[in-house]
Image (cartoon, coloured by chain):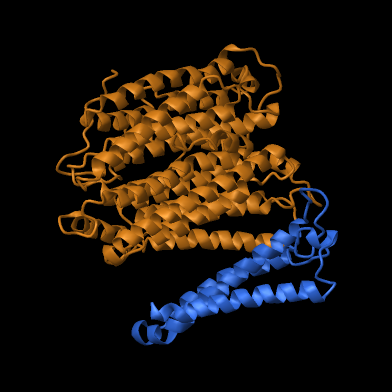
């Protein structure tokens, strides 16, 4: 049980710090007092009032999807880079060509996206 | 004779074709895209012929392989290729409707992907046929499903197509979730994703002293999750509720593709997954009883709900559920003592091939007729025999084969399926099957009666392109040929030489 004492202390410090800063700011500062604006839900900078289902442009989804695609591609390259040297010594250059093939397929996808105007925001 | 080719070249050629088509599409600005479909038909036909010259040997030890090329895999690859070729022919007939619902700057702009995506789907189906590792199964399944998400919602100015797209996307994603969860459970229990190695380690894990001894429920839970996911794909009741709406809303060629390609691939994955567990004495009876229950529910739901349908596309959707039921009968009748699944594999292989011929034939005729009559209700087929005797005859053959009239491929497929059930003395399944076949006669022949005994509402003749006419003729011939000479197809399927899949001579003579 002795081992958990630092964690308990940490919890106590965290709670005391959080509560005390909140209390002090309410007591000393005017900005911390409640008002109607402050009580409304926080929506990442969007207006919290309005239609329940506003329509977003489909471009947002398109850009998000393309971002995820090419993001995952880079994530896939990390483990490849880690095993690259060992694999090259043991099994030859197939690891290089397979990644090149993977990137070539992705490049076709990228060219397709560019020529279809998926990255052209004003269109 | 040239040296046999590595089987993987088939998939590579198909994928390259898809990539080249997408490349062309991105550099051109609209206009007629029919050439894409015609080139795909030509190249995929070459690949189809090519598949007869490949070797089944991948040169990899099965316990390390992701990919196998046994006769079953090659057979299902041919099913995938043939389906895609005929779907392309249907798409060519469907083009005017498609262009109406995708208004672009120029006529035909934005239709290129409609001909490129099925090629990718085909590659995914071919990989699924060969997948012997859960990882490849998953990736191939996603390749198929994601291209279908796009294709189903392709007619973006039509509400029905969008509704179908959303439903298919949400339920497809849900079923994928079940699949991945099931795979993680299997991996957690056995530490393997390769199906051959799972088969090897499971008996020792379940035996006295093994890690899973006395707690089969974890394995059964994993299998249940996998069964739910595959049940979605093959449209087995009670996981069939997406089928009617999605099939009706999707563009007709896509519906045809979904109902044949997606189903065939789902069933071969089911066969491969079941092979790992069905010979375990503590697991098999439970799994088989669940499969039997699914088969009965699917048969009854699909065939009975098809009875009151007025829309041919929706009726074919219910009929596709019904046919999944017949295929599940073959799975529920697996003999755990046999040591292999050859009997079931042969039955589903033949059945699915016959199903491919007759379903694609009916969708092809339906596309042509509904383009002229502006609708795909059964009423629109009234008096088709006067407007186009040839197409009416094609539809007649398709409907008779779907119903299961002797001397058609549909009949022999049903015979094979029921013979597996009779061999296991599973008379409940056989009797439910025969009742539902009787129901099938009613709703399939409803179309025939509309074509031949009702007066046409329009008298303008229905015309079709030469390629379509050739395809209709070829499909009709194939339905009779494989119905009368089934041996030519059975010889391609795995068979147990010691105990041949000898069906007693056809009783209906």
Q: Colour of chain B?
A: orange
Residue B467 place in picture, x, y as percent: 58, 40
Work out whether B395 lies above or below B498.
above
| Labels in figure, total | 0
Kindly indicate the quadrant of the structure image that contains residue B357: top left
The answer to which of B167 and B127 lies nearer the viewer is: B167
Of B50 and B70, nearer the camera is B70
Q: Residue at x 17, y 55 (%)?
A: B207
Q: Nearer the viewer, residue B145 or B259?
A: B145
Residue at 23% in and 60% down:
B211
Quadrant of the image for the N terminus of chain B? bottom left
Does residue A84 show up?
yes
Please identify the residue farthest to the front as the structure is shown: A27
Instruction: Give the residue drawn at x 30%, y 43%.
Output: B345
On the picture, is B110 further left or further right than B362? right
State left or right for residue B99 relative to residue A82: right
B467 with respect to B416 (left or right): right
Q: Residue at x 19, y 46 (%)?
A: B339
Quadrant containing the C terminus of chain B is: top left
Colour in which chain A is shown?
A: blue
Up the image or down, B72 lies above or below B304; here it is below
Q: Position of residue B137 (x, y in %)?
A: 41, 56
Residue B218 x/y as whole percent: 32, 52
Q: Nearer the viewer, residue B61 or A69?
A: A69
The picture quadrant where one finds residue A120 is bottom right
Rendering coords of residue B204 (x, y %) = 18, 58
* Image vertical order of residue B495 relative to residue B210, above or below: above
Evaluate whether residue B481 shows in this view. Answer: no
């Amino acid at each position: 049980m002795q081992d958990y004492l630092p964690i308990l202390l940490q919890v106590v410090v965290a709670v005391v710090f959080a509560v005390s800063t909140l209390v002090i700011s309410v007591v000393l500062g005017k900005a911390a007092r409640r008002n109607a604006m402050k009580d409304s839900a926080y929506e990442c900078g969007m207006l919290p009032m309005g239609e329940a289902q506003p329509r977003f442009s489909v471009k947002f989804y398109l850009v998000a999807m393309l971002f995820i695609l090419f993001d995952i591609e880079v994530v896939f390259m990390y483990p490849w880079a880690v095993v690259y040297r060992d694999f090259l010594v043991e099994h030859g250059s197939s690891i290089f060509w397979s990644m090149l093939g993977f990137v070539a397929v992705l490049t076709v996808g990228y060219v397709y996206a560019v020529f279809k105007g998926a990255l052209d925001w004003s269109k | 004779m040239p040296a046999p080719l590595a089987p993987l070249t088939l998939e590579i050629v198909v994928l390259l074709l898809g990539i080249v088509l997408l490349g062309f599409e991105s550099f051109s600005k609209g206009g007629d895209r029919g050439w894409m479909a015609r080139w795909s038909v030509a190249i995929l036909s070459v690949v189809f012929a090519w598949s007869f010259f490949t070797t089944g040997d991948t040169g990899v030890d099965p316990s390390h392989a992701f990919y196998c090329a046994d006769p079953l895999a090659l057979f299902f690859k041919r099913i995938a290729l043939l389906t895609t070729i005929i779907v392309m022919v249907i798409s060519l007939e469907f083009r005017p409707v498609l262009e109406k619902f995708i208004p672009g700057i120029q006529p035909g702009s934005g239709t290129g992907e409609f001909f490129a995506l099925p090629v990718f789907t085909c590659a995914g189906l071919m990989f699924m046929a060969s997948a012997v590792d859960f990882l490849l199964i998953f990736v191939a399944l996603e390749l198929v499903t994601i291209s279908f998400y796009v294709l189903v919602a392709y007619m973006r100015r039509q509400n029905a197509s969008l509704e179908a797209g959303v439903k298919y996307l949400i339920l497809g994603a849900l079923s994928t979730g079940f699949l991945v969860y099931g795979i993680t459970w299997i991996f957690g229990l056995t530490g393997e994703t390769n199906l051959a190695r799972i088969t090897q380690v499971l008996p020792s894990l379940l035996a006295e002293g093994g890690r899973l001894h006395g707690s089969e429920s974890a394995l059964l839970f994993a299998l249940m999750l996998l069964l739910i996911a595959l049940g979605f794909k093959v449209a087995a009741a009670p996981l069939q509720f997406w089928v009617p709406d999605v099939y009706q809303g999707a563009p007709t060629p896509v519906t045809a593709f979904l109902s044949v390609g997606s189903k065939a691939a789902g069933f071969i994955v089911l066969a491969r997954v079941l092979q790992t567990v069905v010979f375990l004495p503590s697991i098999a009876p439970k799994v088989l009883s669940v499969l039997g229950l699914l088969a009965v529910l699917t048969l009854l739901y699909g065939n009975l709900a098809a009875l009151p349908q007025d829309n041919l596309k929706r009726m074919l959707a219910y009929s596709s559920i019904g046919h999944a039921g017949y295929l599940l009968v073959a799975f529920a009748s697996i003999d755990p003592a046999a040591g292999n699944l050859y009997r079931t594999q042969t039955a589903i292989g033949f059945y699915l091939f016959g199903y491919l011929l007759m379903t694609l034939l009916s969708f092809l005729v339906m596309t042509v007729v509904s383009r002229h009559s502006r609708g795909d209700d059964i009423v629109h087929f009234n008096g088709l025999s006067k407007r186009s005797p040839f197409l009416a005859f094609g539809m007649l053959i398709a409907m008779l084969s779907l119903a299961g009239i002797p001397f058609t491929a549909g009949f022999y497929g049903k015979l094979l399926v029921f013979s597996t059930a009779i061999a296991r003395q599973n008379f409940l399944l056989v009797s439910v099957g025969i009742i539902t076949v009787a129901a099938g006669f009613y709703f399939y022949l409803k179309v025939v009666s509309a074509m031949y005994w009702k007066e046409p509402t329009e008298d303008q003749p229905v015309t079709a392109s030469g390629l379509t006419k050739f395809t209709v003729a070829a499909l009709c011939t194939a339905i009779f040929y494989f119905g009368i000479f089934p041996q030519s197809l059975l010889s391609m399927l795995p068979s147990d030489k010691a105990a041949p899949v000898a069906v007693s001579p056809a009783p209906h003579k």
